Image (cartoon, rainbow, N blue to C red):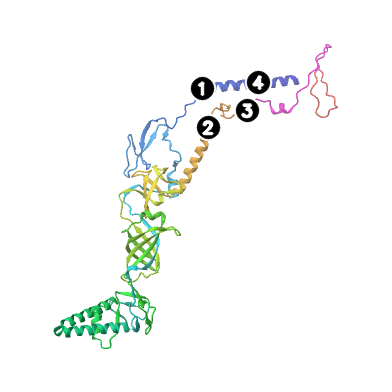
């Protein structure tokens, strides 16, 4: 009875395996050959063109909507395959991330350079009062540093013995020449030459004819009043009233602050965009809310090796005296408007240092990363020399999030391609037609796998019938198996 049970179980398992094998062959024959994969380069049939904004508007031919956006082609089997790195987002996700786009425009730029600058005294408007003769300061009118003086205003009066001698020589020679003009013409000519020599010496001492006439009418003699040569400010007063001075010694130092110099330190990388005649605007936190305008008058021919900057001089009018020497601030150098170029907002350019790219909206919810070549910058605009066309829309807000997702997609696509190339000739694994999972190898039932194989059955040839011996009892090694008789 036990033997017949095992024979029946084995027959059932064998029948199940044979039935599954025939069923699998029939399923594969009915399914037919798998369709060939459509490559990205194979042309596909265009069914129609739909509205890029998702409106219920289609067209059999390419066209643009009222905003200038191209209609999206709908292909047989779906839309066109996206390029590597293209990000597709739903309208809800676009709105949630706050994605904004702007058109690429053709317009002129006015490139500008911003640098730090310091106000200094105009070197061409500095004056020094330094008499060329020896003397003493009798009275000092400009006796305060920082005092403002007008042109022709008295600064100080001086006394000099040399000046007295030259003055008396001039007066005597002039008087004698007039008296001897009729009686002794030769002596009169000699006196005139002596008078002219004395006048030349006084002029060499910077004594004008007006001052000489005043000295001639002054009975005390030797007193000379020095006046201001321009509207200026006393910036240095190294002498006091009653002091003695030597020839050429500085008594007063004046500076005309109606025009000041602005010395700017432009970075060496921007030196190529600086030229004489450029417009400049200056702002300082010391004078909030005010902007001062000027022009570039000089560009240093040598770059400072210590600071790696280029010195630029700007002439800045200062009629109110607000720009005081030593004032610090920022100057912006602006070039003239250039020819029209393609421009995008500065926030649209993703700059990693080695590459620059923008995210172009190729369709509604589809953004394609595209490398570009940037040019000049002006305010919030950047020139694009290569990579985009006029009228295309670029992402100006949330582009970092889209770029991160684009990089992730490109990395995943690259990993998939590497895995396919790693095993070009490996056969596909055997699969179960019904479940498309690897088919398990045929095996006995769990109960049969755990049970030991039965020992050989002895045959009785005595004629009393067959005698079978069941498997050994698992209870002990020394026990005898029970004998069943028919």
Mark 3 to mark 2 CA distance (whole Å): 28 Å
Residue 433: x %, y % from top left: 56, 26
Residue 39: x %, y % from top left: 45, 30
Residue 187: x %, y % from top left: 18, 82
**Which secondary structure lies at badge 1?**
helix
Q: Earlier in the sequence, mark 4 or mark 1?
A: 4
- For the N terminus, the quadrant is top right
Mark 4 to mark 1 CA distance (whole Å): 25 Å
**Residue nearest the observer in this picture, 31 or 197:** 197
Residue for badge 1? 30
Position of residue 425 relative to residue 382, above or below, is above
Residue for badge 3? 440
Bounds of the magenta span?
A: 442-467
Q: Earlier in the sequence, mark 4 or mark 2?
A: 4
Q: Residue at x 47, y 29 (%)?
A: 37
Checking the image for residue 14, the label placed there is 4
Q: For the image shown, how many numbered marks are present on the structure?
A: 4
Residue for badge 2? 421
Mark 3 to mark 4 CA distance (whole Å): 15 Å
**Which secondary structure lies at badge 2?**
helix
- For the C terminus, the quadrant is top right
Relative placement, left or right, of 424 versus 105 is right
Q: Earlier in the sequence, mark 3 or mark 4?
A: 4
């Amino acid at each position: 009875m036990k033997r017949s049970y095992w024979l029946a179980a084995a027959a059932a398992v064998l029948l199940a395996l044979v039935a599954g094998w025939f069923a699998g062959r029939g399923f594969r024959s009915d399914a037919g050959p798998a369709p060939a994969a459509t490559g990205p380069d194979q042309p596909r049939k265009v069914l129609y063109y739909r509205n890029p904004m998702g409106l219920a508007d289609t067209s059999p031919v390419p066209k643009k909507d009222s905003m200038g956006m191209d209609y999206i082609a709908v292909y047989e089997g779906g839309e066109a395959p996206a390029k590597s790195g293209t990000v597709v987002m739903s309208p809800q996700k676009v709105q949630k991330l706050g994605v904004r786009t702007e058109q690429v425009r053709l317009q002129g730029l006015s490139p500008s350079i911003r640098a730090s600058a310091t106000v200094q005294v105009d070197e061409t408007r500095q004056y020094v009062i330094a008499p060329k003769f020896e003397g003493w300061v009798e009275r000092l009118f400009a006796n305060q540093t920082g005092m403002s003086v007008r042109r022709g205003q008295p600064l100080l009066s001086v006394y000099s013995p040399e000046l007295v001698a030259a003055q008396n020589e001039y007066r005597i020679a002039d008087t004698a020449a007039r008296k001897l003009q009729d009686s002794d013409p030769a002596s009169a000519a000699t006196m005139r030459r002596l008078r002219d020599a004395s006048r030349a010496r006084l002029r060499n001492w910077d004594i004008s004819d007006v001052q000489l006439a005043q000295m001639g009418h002054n009975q005390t003699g030797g007193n000379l009043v020095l006046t201001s040569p321009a509207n200026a400010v006393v910036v240095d007063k190294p002498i006091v009233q009653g002091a003695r001075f030597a020839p050429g010694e500085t008594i007063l130092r004046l500076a005309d602050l109606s025009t000041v110099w602005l010395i700017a330190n432009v970075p060496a990388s921007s030196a190529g965009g600086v030229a004489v005649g450029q417009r400049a605007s200056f702002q300082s936190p010391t004078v909030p809310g005010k902007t001062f305008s000027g022009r570039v008058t000089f560009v240093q021919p040598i770059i400072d090796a210590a600071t790696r900057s280029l010195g630029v001089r700007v002439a800045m009018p200062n009629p109110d005296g607000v720009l005081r020497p030593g004032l610090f601030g920022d100057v912006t150098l602006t070039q003239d408007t250039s020819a029209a170029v393609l421009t995008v907002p500065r926030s649209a350019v993703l700059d990693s240092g080695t590459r620059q790219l923008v995210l172009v909206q190729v369709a509604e919810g589809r953004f394609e990363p595209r490398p570009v070549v940037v040019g000049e910058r002006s305010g919030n605009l950047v020139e694009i020399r290569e990579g985009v066309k006029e009228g295309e829309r670029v992402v100006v807000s949330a582009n970092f999030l889209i770029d991160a997702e684009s990089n992730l997609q490109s990395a995943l696509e690259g990993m998939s391609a590497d895995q396919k190339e790693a095993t070009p000739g490996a056969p596909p694994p055997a699969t179960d037609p019904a479940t498309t999972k690897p088919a398990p190898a045929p095996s006995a039932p769990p109960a049969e796998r755990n049970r030991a194989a039965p020992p050989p059955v002895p045959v009785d040839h005595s004629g009393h019938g067959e005698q079978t011996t069941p498997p050994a009892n698992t209870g002990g090694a020394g026990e005898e198996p029970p004998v069943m008789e028919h």
